[in-house]
Amino acid sequence: MARPFDNDRLVIASHNAGKVREIAELLAPYDISVVSAGELGLPEPEETGTTFAENAALKARASVAGSGLPALADDSGFSVAALDGAPGIHAARYATREDGTRDFAWAMERLHAETADADDRTAWFTCALALAWPDGHVEIFEGRVDGMLAWPPRGDRGFGYDPVFVPNGYAETFGEMSPARKHAMSHRAIAFEHLIAACFTADDG
């Protein structure tokens, strides 16, 4: 039995503006005041886990320690079958240039160069959510959406690798989809469905 969330404040343990916005939109139906780790000036912890769940828990606990508030962390990544599941948990690192800047347009070019001759275009997004409390309790929820690697990139509505991913059963990339359409079926949305069902109650007032 998962622990219900009964606080009115929550830290989103991320410095990624696109991710913070997406999580805040998913939490919109609930009577919770959210603030990001970036807004609080909390440092980004080193992601030393070997799985999405481990890294999500690590980030959630770091934000709890820095804020004294419950925190929700997301660790997500993009995996490509032709690269044996890479970049996977290293999706952000894969998009980081030598000078330390994160450049997803460059990362998508890099993916294309490394998979141009591959017959298998299968790809997938994975998301793990960790909800942590100040007493050390953590709940973990995971989601995954499968699809195909697309080229060239299409759409500017998402972030990260969204413009080169077409989910199974759809013609649009995540980058072309409206936020509402993407939120209805993304890896983060699937993980959120599990989180909400287990820990949250909609505010009817």
Image: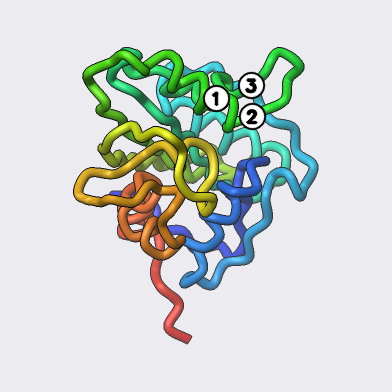
- Residue in view at x 34 percent, y 51 percent: 172
Q: Secondary structure at mark 2?
A: loop
Residue 97 vertical position relative to residue 144 in the rendered view, above or below: above
Toward the left, the furthest residue is 169
- Residue 34, located in which quarter of the rendered image? bottom right
The residue type indicated by label 3 comes to: Thr
> CB under 8 Å between callouts 3 and 1?
no
Q: Which mark is residue 96?
A: 3
Q: Upstream in the sequence, badge 3 or badge 2?
A: 3
The residue type indicated by label 1 comes to: Ala
> Which color scheme is applied?
rainbow
Q: Residues within 10 Å of mark 3 (few under 14, many from 20)?
A: some
In the displayed structure image, the side of residue 202 where residue 168 appears, left or right: left
Q: Nearer the viewer, mark 3 or mark 1?
A: 1
Q: Upstream in the sequence, badge 3 or badge 1?
A: 3
In the displayed structure image, the side of residue 54 where residue 60 appears, left or right: right
- Residue in view at x 52 percent, y 24 percent: 109
Q: Secondary structure at mark 1?
A: helix
> CB under 8 Å between callouts 3 and 2?
yes
Toward the right, the furthest residue is 41
- Residue in view at x 43 percent, y 42 percent: 129
